[in-house]
Amino acid sequence: MGDMQYNDMNLYQDSEDEEKLMKLPEAQREAILYNRYMKIKKLEEKKEVEHRIDELHEQGTKEHGTAVQEECITYDMLCDVLVPRTLLAKNVYRPAIDRLVGNFVRVCFKSGYVVKRVEGMQRASEYFVEESTKNYRTNKNICIVRGSGARECIPMSFISNSRPSFAEYDHFKMSYPDLCVAALVKKAHAFKNAMTREMSADERARAQEERSKFYRDKRKNLMEKIRLIREREDAFKNGDAEKVRAVQKRIDEIDEKDKDPAEEKEKEIWDRINAKNRRINYEKGVRAGLEKARNKDSAGRRK
């Protein structure tokens, strides 16, 4: 409101009102006019305050828009917050592994790689998750939401160690437009710290208990297997086919748990080498047969 003074204002409603007030004693008339002046002044002050509030709100909206633009996650920030497979593999038995939920990972599908948020964790079939030189057995899967909106649980072995492509980065920004970058960075760093700090005695005990679910003592496994083989033979003698199948299933489970990941990996390599050699030998045989046929045909024409 401006600096309008009491004497500068026309406080009469109309000529009739002015005439009526002028007939009153001066003190009474001035009191009425002053009260009117104070009411008008308060209304003007209220309007001024409301106007300033509107200006502040408008300014705050503009500043918020700028802050949102500044908060947009960069490519390097995304690379920093992604959780790699190796970190999960060597800490897969830690109780704090479940804090992975809410963090982001780069996962591999048939259609290619994509950055996804971990929506949950769930136990399923056992598998090996590879670090760099060592494999770890687990049955914990991560749950993600596909582009179709369907929830899917996949092994941690699907998680990549590599940085995403810029195309994946652009797709990530479109898929998660409303992320709070500060909260995302804080959560990722907290998880990585939980994976690298020293565990408490209780955490170590729980981690050992988790590991023992997948790696039993080999000697105990052997004794258990011998007992089961005897039980299976007795079932054979008694003609109990159902029991034979049940016992054999338990034997197979022990054999599966006793597999050495390194040996299994080496076996896969040799299988691929043998398959390659068989293909080469086959191709050599085909070429030799064709060469022999050509030589025979040439000899026949010379005759």
Image (cartoon, grey):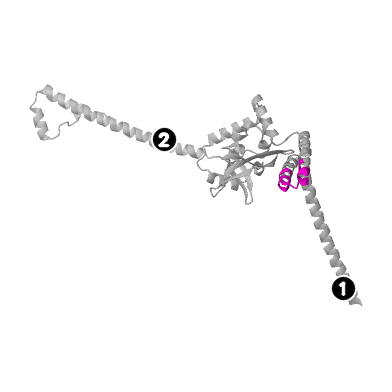
**Residue 50 appears in which quarter of the rendering?**
top left
Q: Is residue 243 above or below residue 211?
A: below
**Measured from the top left, where is residue 1 in percent x and y?**
28, 31
Residue 147's tag is: none
Region of the chain picked out in magenta, as a range = 231-247
Residue 162 on image: x %, y %: 66, 42
Name, please, the residue furthest toward the bottom.
Answer: 303
* Magenta stretch prevailing secondary structure: helix
Q: Is residue 26 above or below residue 116?
A: above
The outermost residue toward the front is 238
Compare residues 33 and 113 and report the one nearer the observer: 113
Residue at (67% x, 31% y) in the render: 209
Give how far across and how far down residue 181 sits, in percent: 53, 37
Residue that mark 2 sits on: 60
Extreme residue in the left direction: 23
Circle nearer the viewer, 2 or 1: 1
Amino acid at dot 1: Asp
Horizontal relation, residue 1 to residue 263: left or right = left
Whichever of callouts 2 and 1 sits on the residue coming sooner in the sequence is 2
Name the quadrant of the C terminus. Answer: bottom right
The residue that label 1 is drawn on is 297
> In what element is the residue under mark 1?
helix
Q: Who is closer to the viewer here, 35 or 100?
A: 100
Q: Does the CB distance between marks 2 and 1 fall below 8 Å?
A: no
The answer to which quarter of the image holds residue 145 is top right
Q: Categorize mark 1 by other alpha carbons within 10 Å: few (<14), some (14-19), many (20+).
A: few
Residue 218 in view of the camera: yes
Residue for point 28% across, 30% down: 45
Q: Amino acid at mark 2?
A: Gly
> How far is disc 2 from disc 1 in space, using C-alphas?
92 Å
Front in this rendered view, residue 99 or 160: 99
